[in-house]
Amino acid sequence: MVKPEVNRDSCLGCSGCFTICPANAIEFDGKATIIKERCISCHTCVNYCPVGAIVVEGE
Amino acid sequence: METYEYDCVIVGGGPAGLVTARYISEAGFSVAVLERDREIGVPVLCGEGVSRNIDNLGVTERRDWVENEIVGARIFSPNGTMVKMSAERAGGETGYVIDRERFDKELARIAAKKGADIFVMCDAKKANVEGGEIREIEAKLDGKDVKFTGKIFVGADGVESKVGRWVDIDTRLKPKDIVSCYEYTLSDVECDKDYTDFFVGRSLAPGGYIWIFPKSDDTANVGIGVLASYSKSALAKQLLDKFIEKKDFLRKGKPVRKLAGAVPVALPIQSYRGNVVLVGDAARHTDPLTGGGIIHAVIGGRVAGETIARALREEKLSLLEEYEKGWREKIGKKLERNYKMKELASTFDDKTFDKLADSVKDINFEELSTRGLIKALVTKHPSLLFKLKSLIG
């Protein structure tokens, strides 16, 4: 599966993806960033995001 | 690197952190509050509904944060059946619609007046931990590297609680224990400013609800929470937009604010370890049924502040266990009961919500008791009793 990315322009900074990520693969500094090396491609963060700011390329 | 020394260092300048700070400084100890953002209370990440119980907690002096006084709550089931409750009964989020920015700034003003130091634009980056205790926190203050040392540290850093993780408290949440929220503040709407409205339904807001919290007769917070286990990318926003589009009194509204929020609807986690204490959303003290967090943050913050002051006075970290006992005594039972109710309600289909609403719509909620509820269910929809049996008794 493809690793998702955060569109930081549409991220509203709720921090939910950071909290829900089972792999500790998200950094949060007011907005989210996905650390690709740790991402397990489970897409839990993609489904969580209330505004669709976490996107999977090609989808 | 510049180093600041305090008795207690609190990460997070929301209600939980500010109330904790106030009670520590009132007891004569030095305390710092580190706030990542450049302003207390901003950005707002909240529906801004709070129960009138806030008045009994004695944490504010000014009242300019009350935007609108609410008479009651109306809950609408999927087929439009309305259940009306007075503000006293509805609890949780009914009573006032508040201006969270002003509310937090009032808590900050009082904490500061009592002697607490508040550092805004101060992002706590990492902790140096020895033997399970935090020794110092490295932070960026105005973009410069600084250190904060302390005897006790507090994680008041919200749903994401990094402070908890620094001492190996697992603050991750499973999808069934976190709600994905989106909200507009809409102006130029027509709303009944006497009521906060809640709309429930599996297709409307799976595992959560849509709310309308009026700030005045032409401006309201209109938001949605969707349980993450039912969420898909952007679902919260899509369902809220669909709801607004269908309501004549909201459709013409203009958004003057957009916000997203993550709300823990979990059981509380371990609230202290070593020299670290977690308060508010960080400790998962949010009401799992309503998603309301302010009252519990304030109650827990006071217990934390008073307990930390005692631990500092007697120089005994083991006293921090009194914090866990203290908040459990005040809000523990309610959190557990409402967690059960949330687990159950998240399985309801639209028909169950309709039957439930039909059963209780004529009850005078001033007099509602468990017995009265059972009687109403037996009379109208006995099949519901089976579904609700885990809550009864």
Image (cartoon, rainbow, N blue to C red):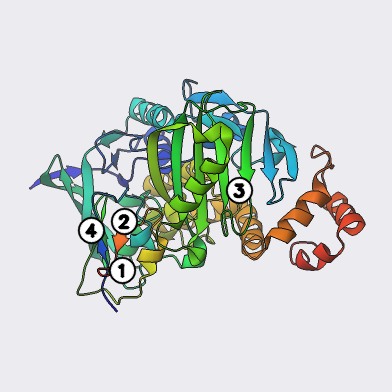
- In the rendered image, residue B360, in percent from the top left (x then y), is placed at 81, 48
| C-alpha separation, residue under disc 4 versus residue under disc 1 | 39 Å
The chain under label 1 reads: A
The residue wearing badge 3 is: B330
Q: Secondary structure at mark 4?
A: strand
**Vertical relation: B193 (above or below) B22:** above
Q: Residue at x 89, y 55 (%)?
A: B380
Between B190 and B355, the one nearer to me in the picture: B190
In the picture of the structure, the residue carrying the numbered disc 2 is A53
Answer with mark 2 or mark 1, whichever residue precedes in sequence: 2
* Residue behind mark 1: A59
Residue B127's tag is 4
Rendered location of residue B23, percent (x, y): 43, 37
Q: Amino acid at mark 2?
A: Ala
Would you place residue B312 above or below residue B202 in this image? above
Chain at tag 3: B
Q: Is residue B166 left or right of residue B366?
A: left
Image quadrant assignment for residue B54:
top right
Instruction: Give the structural element (helix, strand or loop) at label 3.
Output: helix
- Labels 3 and 4 within one chain: yes
Tell which of B100 and A33 is nearer to you: A33
Amino acid at dot 1: Glu
Quadrant in which the C terminus of chain B is drawn = bottom right
**C-alpha span from label 4 to label 2:** 30 Å
**How far is the residue under mark 3 from the one under mark 1?**
48 Å
